[in-house]
Amino acid sequence: MKFFTTTQIRQLDQYTIEHEPISSINLMERAANALYGSFTGIFPNSTPVCILAGQGNNGGDALALARLLLKSNYQVSVYLIYSGSLSADCETNRQRLRSAYPSTIKELKEEFDVPIIPKDTVLVDGLFGSGLSRPLGGIFEQAVAWMNQSKHRIVSIDIPSGLSGEENKLTDKSVIVKASITLSLQFPKLAFLLAENAPFVGKLKILDIGIHPDAIDKTTSNLYYLEEKDITPFLKSRSEFSHKGTFGHALIVAGSKGMAGASVLSSLAALRSGAGLVTVHGPAANRIIVQTSIPEVIFRSDTSDEIISHIDSHDMFSAIAIGPGIGTLPVTAGMLHEFLVKTNNPCVIDADALNIISMQKDLLQHIPKNSILTPHPKEFERLFGECNSSYERIMKAQKASKIYGIIIVLKGAHTVIAIPNGNLYFNSTGNSGMSTAGSGDVLTGILAGLLAQGYSPEETALTGVYLHGHAGDLALRHETKESLIAGDIISSLGDSFRSIRGNTD
């Protein structure tokens, strides 16, 4: 899904109004119906509701929602809070609500009166939308402070009031609604996908309000939210006359003495991702462990018993992944330098290989174009410099991807994939249970397995990240976030492929 900045979203709304055509008040009614459908799907009509509406169109959405809920016999109290004039559509919905339910709405202009409401009341935050350009103050600050201290569940319309849609470096974090659920209209906001804003967004739901498809197609953006429908077309079909050589031969350069597990996890993930053959190059001490754990894997022993010191004959492989568990000793660093200087084909670079590069920054110039780097935030900062926020880190990833012609997979919640053309893809799958030892090694193996099968580097990165997170989500059918381990992700890869294909292959 392509998504947009908040400025662009306002332009898309206007295009829809002009070209559908539809009046702005009817577009607001359409949004209110989407909000109503989602809200009523979560909360039964026995739930008391208190709606706090502001003076702009976000407030108009909230007032329209109030009217629809009242029509369905919800117990609703409405507080219209404003310090100036109302927007035209907000005024229209005020009049509609007053006409149908005259005793429901209370208007506050100067000082916030604390509502007296049942303890199980759900609060609806409709104070300000994504167009807010200044910190909240006065009566609005009082309202936000009350909501956050109330311990009631809070549903924010489109965006938690006080939060900016993109960068929030100058935003006063103490004056932002801490939503339990955010019902975002048509698109996610970039701010929702950044770690520092998680306490404000809560659970995110994206509601389709029928923005004109031509507007979406014609408006350029480098922001994408990865969904299943984006990944399904990438998956390759398999001919009945294919053989193991058809699906490529992946080389996994991984492990050191005591770190054989990195080799096991990454190579098994490569096999489970569809690679026809997988070879592990590792220290001789790990041979028995790897081949006992995974008899399907070929093991090629390094001349060293304890570390990886040299790689010979790597031109025969369809894809190479290097880094998990290799350590950063000088001999291994020399091996990596020699490998990068001699390698021309895109490869997957992870873990200790990234740490070595961060200590020898000149190696960045030798990374083959379109290689896939998979740093977690600390590894990224060691490579490209410290960052004060997730937003700054993402912008640096975008810049570094362009400069070096590499694909950067910045791991974390909503893993970000930066492509050399400037596009940024945010993943929609995965969960906090995947924050466990070996999860990154599994991702490296998945990427190597896909790359070996002939997926382009970009397809590999997007598909691999989505599959990895999706398999982690499916693993929760049998595990909890506390009990989930890396091997569970691998065990769920088959179900993930099956689900994404729609059981058609």
Image (cartoon, grey):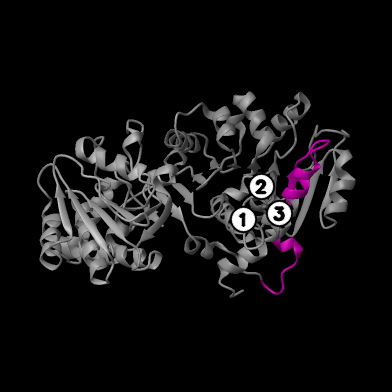
Q: Crowdedness of circle 3 by 10 Å Cα count: few (<14), some, many (20+)? A: many
Q: Quadrant of the N terminus?
A: bottom left
**Does the magenta-highlighted stretch encompass residue 262?**
yes
| Residue position for label 2 | 439
Query: Is the residue 140 above or below the residue 67 in the image?
Result: above
- Near-viewer residue (356 or 130): 130
Gap in Å between the C-alphas at discs 1 and 2?
Answer: 9 Å
Q: Amino acid at mark 2?
A: Ser
- Taking the spot 74% from the left edge, 37% from the top edge, the residue there is 325
Q: Residue 134: name its quadrant.
A: top left
Q: Quadrant of the C terminus?
A: bottom right
Q: Amino acid at mark 3?
A: Ala
- Near-viewer residue (465 or 97): 97
- The reply to whether callout 1 and callout 2 are in contact (CB within 8 Å) is yes
| Residue position for label 1 | 472
Is residue 330 left or right of 110 when viewed as pictured? right
Residue 162 visible in the displayed image: no
The mark nearer the N terminus, 2 or 3, is: 3
Q: Secondary structure at mark 3?
A: helix
Q: How many marks?
A: 3
Q: Amino acid at mark 1?
A: Gly
The mark nearer the N terminus, 3 or 1, is: 3
| Residue position for label 3 | 269
Front: mark 2 or 3: 2
Gap in Å between the C-alphas at discs 2 and 3?
Answer: 10 Å
Range of magenta residues: 239-266
